[in-house]
Image: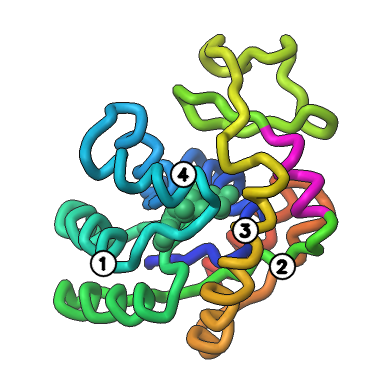
Amino acid sequence: MNVIFLGAPGSGKGTVSELLIKKNNFIQLSTGDLYREQIAKQTPLGVEAASYMNAGKYVPDEITIKVVKGFLQEHNDKLIFDGFPRTIAQAEALDTILKDLAKQVDKVIYLKCDSKVIIERLTGRLICPKCKKSYHVVSLKPKKEGICDNDGSELIKRPDDQEDKIQVRLNEYNTLTKPLIEYYKDKIVEIQADKGGPEDHYNNIIKEINK
Ligand code: ADP
């Protein structure tokens, strides 16, 4: 069972993935996290990815597809794709790679979210650089201000969570990623992701996955 989480930045893909990993032993492939790890280590891939990410732009398809192909040689089942594919070219490449491994995309969960809610979430988002848990300055505060509940690290604001970068990211999403809703029309399930909390979304998603 391989599941794609599709949705705008801030729609809650990462947060719900976290629950599916903990409770149902899924393995997450988050291309955004993967790039952030490379940026932290200052590898050549990280330096290149940062030049796009920090501007709010997508990393070019050929780079992302190569990275994902490498990951899929190690893991190709019980996967949650979080933030990949983001373009039709990436979706086509994923189909080909999985077919060669006798696997497929089984379900696509579309986290539908109002754009006003998205902007509120992203402008107030803080993340833990170590465990990647995300918080919100108003609606999802850590127990101690600025400190991660899990591991005591100092929380940071992602460079692409500045308001001007958020707008670029939303434009990228609307132009390049939204067409995937049509591409996956036979496998897609829509979840209303701007009402209720992560546990409610998790419960709806797991019901769909187990159908
Ligand atoms: P969000 O969903 O909040 O935008 P991500 O961590 O998924 O956060 O992605 C952050 C950034 O990483 C994107 O704006 C983009 O620059 C880069 N990125 C992640 N995944 C991809 C992808 N599949 N294709 C191109 N760029 C990507």
Q: Which residue is mark 1?
A: 62
Calculate the distance from the C-alpha at mark 2 to the C-alpha at mark 4: 21 Å
Calculate the distance from the C-alpha at mark 4 to the C-alpha at mark 1: 28 Å
Q: Nearer the viewer, residue 149 or 178?
A: 178
Q: Amino acid at mark 4?
A: Ile
Q: Nearer the viewer, residue 12 or 175?
A: 175
**Splitting the image into 4 quarters, where does residue 142 fall?**
top right
Q: Position of residue 2 (x, y in %)?
A: 38, 66
* Label 1: element kind: helix
Residue 119 numbered tag? none
Between marks 4 and 1 in the image, the one whose residue lies nearer the viewer: 1
Is 121 inside the magenta-drawn segment? yes
Q: Which residue is mark 4?
A: 21
Calculate the distance from the C-alpha at mark 4 to the C-alpha at mark 3: 30 Å
Q: Which residue is mark 3?
A: 168
The residue depicted at 82 percent of the width and 53 percent of the height is: 117
The residue depicted at 42 percent of the width and 75 percent of the height is: 106
Q: Which residue is mark 2?
A: 112
Q: Which residues are magenta?
A: 117-125
